[in-house]
Image (spheres, rainbow, N blue to C red):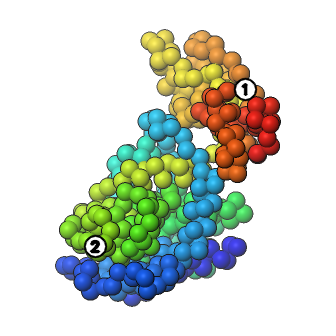
Amino acid sequence: MKQFRYWFILGGLFMGAIFQVVGCAVETPEEVDDGAGDVSGDLDREQAADRSALHLGRACGVQALPKHEFDRIEQEFNKVKIVRPQHAFTTPTTIPVYFHVINNGSGIANGNIPDSQITAQMDVLNAAFASAGLGFQLIQIDRTTNATWYTMAPLSEEETAAKSALHKGGPDTLNIYTANLGDDLGGWATYPSYYDSDTPWFDGVVILYSSVPGGTASPYHLGDTATHEVGHWLGLYHTFEGACDPSPTGGDGVADTPAERGPAFGCLTTRDSCPTIAGLDPVTNFMDYSDNACANNFTGGQVSRMQAMWDTYRLPPPCAHDKCSTGTPLAASSTCGSVVQQICSVDPYCCDTEWDDICVNEVFSVGNSVVCSTGTCSHGLCVTGSVLTPGCDPNGVVNSICSDDPYCCNTWWDGLCVSEIGSIAGKNCN
Ligand SMILES: [Zn+2]
């Protein structure tokens, strides 16, 4: 299975891409057929990928998936998807970032980019993902001089060696590697569902060192190559995934990104490469190939997808704490406001989720015994239940549980919710 999915990412190499973009190097709608009725979904997707190789510009190494693999990912995602209410992201979820600078010696010309460019890159990421309630915190920069790693390609021995030596953290930790990528690539990334605890080092984002803000990879020198790759890391496809797929969610699994036949370069804001499908091409979207100066948005649908991807595949197991349903946030009163800040800095878990017994206890230890909450747990809880299998929904099981015990539908399914399936609904669904 591992080899299977590696293959798809390796397939993303656009060997024919040429670095420098000059003018409008994109095909017009008239120059391509719309693929309607003459190809299978698989072929249409593969053709879209092939087309991208004809264009000029730094390419991304994440490949358009064959339809059967796309469908497999989407079906699995829809089956296990966790969707928290939107307000769960009003306080940004902070993603720890390890930045690995792979260079060929000293100086920017050898890829040894300065801290100032890395800080600027972090600022670009934080601005780009703010609308998604996702923030990035630089934890550490490390620098490695290695001539062979420096020119690594996707799925190469060099990538394996570099990543397995340098990678830090788990699925919720973003590892960014900079190097002088071969094959005219701007970067590549791994999808959330491909995270494998047996090979955690595989997870992460690789970008061209000169694509960071102030770099020389114009017109991809403003830091949005990283934005694009982190978008993949959070589960987004290219906006041109699936080409002119007429389905409601288009070829990229997102309903509000109009279908697009292939990547756009430059800033062709009036391009309409799927004229029989509503909407102009989303060329200003971060998940297209337009110039950095042109790319400026994720859509609401992409934001929802990234949040659900985060919760489903990357969020640490909520049961790291013995969570309580009645803890709620501490009162931000004059007495407790500073205590809340102290707790959050010591234990971000408490501020990223419901306050629980451990958080409350930390008020006493961190906040010098200030009493800010008296909540007690009504559930004994754990999260291993995740969500019910869809097979139970037609029988109204979820609705009956939710109406009887809203806790189960306002938060994670836990042991109590699962047991209620039996007592309330008389079913065994988990
Ligand atoms: Zn990409």
Taking depth in this image into account, of 177 and 376 the one nearest to the observer is: 376
On the question of residue 98 being in view, the answer is: no
Note whether 427 is above or below 233 in the view shown: above
In the image, residue 232 lies at what x, y percent? Answer: 48, 63
Task: Identify residue for label 1.
Answer: 379
Q: Which x, y percent locates residue 176?
A: 49, 61
Q: Residue at 64% across / 13% down in the picture?
A: 374
**x then y, percent, for residue 10:** 55, 79
* Quarter in which the N terminus is drawn: bottom right
Q: Residues within 10 Å of mark 1 (few under 14, many from 20)?
A: some
Element at label 2: loop
The residue lying toward the viewer, choosing from 262 and 17, is 262
Q: Is residue 284 left or right of residue 378?
A: left
Residue 204 image-quadrant placement: bottom right
Question: Mark 2 sits on what residue?
Answer: 275
* Structural crowding at the residue carrying mark 2, measured as other residues with C-alpha within 10 Å and reported as few (<14), some (14–19) or many (≥20): some
Tag 2 near tag 1, CB within 8 Å: no
Residue 323 lies, with reference to residue 41, above or below; the image says above
Q: Earlier in the sequence, mark 2 or mark 1?
A: 2
Q: Amino acid at mark 1?
A: His
> Which element carries disc 1, helix, strand or loop?
loop
